[in-house]
Amino acid sequence: VALVRMQSDSMKPPAERRNYTSVIDALLQVKRNEGLAALYTGLAPNILRGMAMNVGGLSCYDQAKLFTMRVFGDTDPKKVSLATQLSAASFAGFAASFLSLPCDLIKSRLQDMKPLPDGTMPYRGIADCASKVLRNEGVFAFWTGMGPYWARLAPQSTIILLTIEAIRPAYRQTFRIEA
């Protein structure tokens, strides 16, 4: 909550800013002004985002690796080139980004919301937020910022997936698992 609010504060007109001085200040103000539960605003879409990211990245990687093996002329799935691994990880990073960005948008909207002039909140939850974004901004709004999001997620996905590739043989040997 603190991170999202502090980042969005800098883009708002001065009259609408919360003006937190630090992460600790943000957390204390949220607790004091909105209650302890407000610190957990956006938890459910954040969990969904993590699930979507892992489903997109991990499920796509092996399929992308099989495809890129043909492109780079690799024949043994146990011994693929670095180019194959990097390409497959890039595809997996894109899939992870594509599937998780809508959840990230909803999470950020929920975490950054302020009461409207009548005292009600703009969104009642995940479904309400998603339906209002879809109705008011269109389906493509869920992927606003896809380029920068993928640019941030691709290196992370690449490091994770290449680490898995490096560790997998030792894991299989240690626990005597046949590939």
Image (tube, helix red, strand yellow):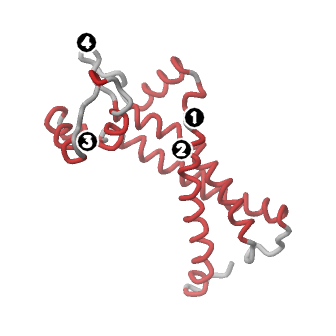
Note whether 75 is above or below 25 in the view shown.
below
Compute the Cα span from label 1 to label 3.
Answer: 25 Å
Q: Position of residue 88 (x, y in %)?
A: 70, 60
| Sequence-first disc among 2 and 4 | 2
Q: Residues within 10 Å of mark 1 (few under 14, many from 20)?
A: some
Q: Residue at x 35, y 43 (%)?
A: 43
| Sequence-first disc among 2 and 1 | 2
Q: Position of residue 64 (x, y in %)?
A: 73, 58
Q: Position of residue 153 (x, y in %)?
A: 54, 52
Give the residue pinned by disc 3. Answer: 39
Q: Secondary structure at mark 2?
A: helix
In the image, taking residue 68 as reference, residue 33 lies left or right, namely: left
Q: Secondary structure at mark 4?
A: loop
The dot on residue 143 is: 1
Q: Residue at x 32, y 37 (%)?
A: 5
Give the residue pinned by disc 2. Answer: 100
Note whether 18 is above or below 81 in the view shown.
above
Give the residue pinned by disc 4. Answer: 118
Q: Residues within 10 Å of mark 3 (few under 14, many from 20)?
A: some
| Sequence-first disc among 4 and 1 | 4
The quadrant of the image that shows the C terminus is bottom right
Q: Residue at x 24, y 17 (%)?
A: 119
